[in-house]
Image: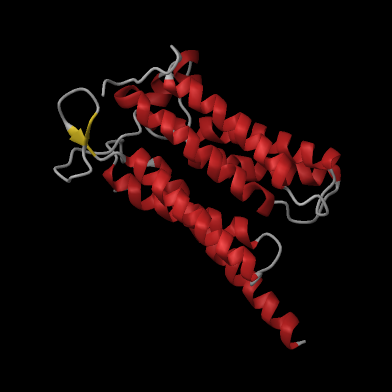
Amino acid sequence: MHFPVYLFGIHPHLLFESLAYFIGFRVYLYTRNKERIPLDKAIWVVVGATLGAAIGSKVLYWFESPVKTVENWNNIIYLVEGKTIVGGLLGGLIGVESAKKCIGWTRSTGDDFVLPLTIGMMIGRIGCFLTGLDDHTYGTPTTWIMGIDFGDGIKRHPTQLYEIIFLLLLIITLTYLKRKQLGWEGWLFQLFMLGYLIFRFLIDFIKPTPHPYFILNNIQLASLLGIIYYIALVLKKQTEKRREIHA
């Protein structure tokens, strides 16, 4: 296989990123809980999520190499070219909460995003994998059987494929838990975020990115903060649910 793998003459990153956004949005419209939030307000939530994700993905990328970012503060190409999924998720969360405040909506909307996000991220990672070295999402060199040569003669961890497999297992698990109806409104999204952030915190130890924050990189630092937040939130919600049961 020669990377990048063009399909129908289209660069894989552009093709699969476009498919991820299109299919993810269609899945959201089809699977969202129509009784939880009306369509007119749901669209504003999506707008907030999109804008927040766009900003968050860029801002977190700038912290990958703070020194390099400072050196290129006036380089527009450098400032706009990179993005991160973790930054997009956390920025999207802020965007959604901001949009909800603007439209006066107080109920949780996160559960409706779990399936669309998972599908979109899996599709997007296919594009990352097929792009090869140019995408900079591969792992460190390895002699493991899963190692992939992306074109320079060095076998590396295909961390894009690891993420696809993890997301598939995560959505299967969350779908099972959803059928059991064990939690509270918003708990599926909280578990999704917690699971994915833990995965990213661990997988980035085998990514050849700068680790300027002691032994951590920008993704791991943001993931760690997110993990702490969601653990505290889940524990709080569990305590509230127990009180309701015993009230």
Residue 155 is at least partly visible in this image:
yes
Q: Is 90 placed above or below 69 here?
A: below
The mark tally for this picture is: 0
In the image, taking residue 40 as reference, residue 69 lies left or right, namely: left
Q: Give x and y (percent) for residue 20.
A: 55, 32
| Rendered residue at 46%/50% (across/down) | 168
In the image, residue 174 sits, relative to residue 44, either above or below, namely below
Residue drawn at point x = 34 percent, y = 45 percent: 204
Q: Can you name the residue that lies furthest to the front here?
A: 8
Depth check: give the residue in front, 211 or 104. 104
What is the quadrant of the C terminus in the image? bottom right
Residue placed most toward the observer, 77 or 181 = 181
* Vertical order, 68 against 76 (above or below): below
Q: Residue at x 71, y 63 (%)?
A: 185
Q: Position of residue 72 (x, y in %)?
A: 42, 18
Quadrant of residue 210 in the image? Answer: top left
Give the vertical position of 245 relative to 63 (above or below): below
205 with respect to 66 (left or right): left
Q: The N terminus is located in which quarter?
A: top left
Q: Residue furthest bottom?
A: 246
Farthest-out residue, top? 9
Instruction: Please provide percent x and percent y for residue 161.
Output: 36, 41
Q: Can I make out residue 213 in this image?
A: no
Give percent across and percent down for residue 200.
41, 48
Return the residue nearer the eye: 44 or 154. 154
